[in-house]
Amino acid sequence: MLVEVTHREGVADPEGATIERALPALGFGGVSRVRVGKAIRFELEADSEEAARREVEEMCRRLLANPVIEQASSSVVAAPGPASRAEGGRA
Amino acid sequence: MSLKVAVVVFPGTNCEHDVARALGDLGASCELVFHDRSRLAGFDAVVLPGGFAHGDYLRPGAIARFSPVMGEVRRLAGEGAPVLGICNGFQVLTEAGLLPGALQRNAGLRFVCRPVRVRIESQSCVLTRHLEPGTVLRIPVNHMLGNYVCEPATLAELRAESRIVARYVDNPNGSLDDIAGVCNRQGNVVGLMPHPERACDPLLGPPDGRPLLAGLLGARAPLDAGLL
């Protein structure tokens, strides 16, 4: 699973604002809406993708994000294939 | 008999001795209690001091709120005992849901560490009950995430119920409505970003933190009589 936690829309993001000011100074034009957050990646065993999503939503609500200032989005990413896992992982 | 204060120590807390010394000088009997304690018996008040509880991993206070001692902090708060969170302790209390809002990164991304002037705004909490609103105190701040935010509805409620305890005279961190401290509805749970314990010894400047900490110690009786 990959959970991305960012500031909620409307909550000031001073790090994002600083990066947005810095990029044009290096010649990168056209950059807007920079948001800085954190990525939390983990493996989760679940009966189905739907069950995994439900569980991750609960994790976000109770620990991974602070709903007062943050929003979280999660996505399922493929686990490493059998070649890279000793015990023979799932795709 | 002197009041017995539990000064909670999480892994990474670093202001516990300053708090215990300042409260001790005011006549309290302080005990440092480690965060794994699941029973706090015989304490009249609790302080969550500053520092970096659990390394501030994930977010300041995000892990600390699950420490075993927090169940007891919640119980004592519910019973009306004075509970004060200073700096990181304030962050822990918001994460634990004992105070509204959240503390995010300072505007300007600057760590601020200097004495600031704060104006007492309300007598509705244990710390300020004996202070005249409008009183300006000089107290040090020392934080990276002291920028208070909350929902507009929460802000309206805090204002209407006089729960904004203190405001910065010159806002050092971008805090919403210049908020330096807030309290719960009953007035016994208080969060402050400035460190009153660092302004208690005249050797270090005006001892402006003393009236706040004295309020914490003197407040038990009027709180019991008045609000509960």
Image: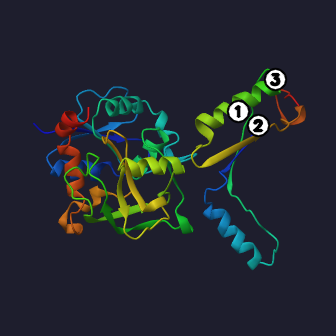
**Of the residues shown, which amino acid type is indicated by label 1?**
Val
Q: Which of A33 and A5 is in front in this view?
A: A33
Per the image, label 1 sits on a secondary structure element best described as helix
Please give the chain letter of the residue carrying mark 2: A
Number of labels in the image equals 3
Residue A36 visible here: yes
Residue in the picture at 82% in, 30% down: A86
Instruction: Judge left or right: residue B63 versus residue B72.
Output: right
Residue in the picture at 33% in, 34% down: B77
Mark 3 and mark 2 in contact (Cβ < 8 Å)?
Answer: no
Residue B222 placement (x, y as % from top left): 18, 39
**Of the residues shown, which amino acid type is indicated by label 3?**
Ser
Give the alpha-carbon distance from disc 1 to disc 3, as whole Å.
12 Å
Residue B50 visible here: no
Residue B11 placement (x, y as % from top left): 43, 42
Please give the chain letter of the residue carrying mark 3: A
> Circle 2 is placed at which residue position?
A1
**Of the residues shown, which amino acid type is indicated by label 2?**
Met
- Vertical arrangement, residue A69 with respect to residue A58, above or below: below
> Circle 3 is placed at which residue position?
A48
Q: Which of B180 and B159 is in front in this view?
A: B159
**Residue B5 position by quadrant:** top left
**Same-chain status of marks 1 and 2:** yes
Residue in the picture at 73% in, 42% down: A73
> Circle 1 is placed at which residue position?
A56
Mark 2 and mark 1 in contact (Cβ < 8 Å)?
Answer: yes
Instruction: Judge left or right: residue A39 versus residue B77.
Output: right
Give the alpha-carbon distance from disc 1 to disc 2, as whole Å.
8 Å
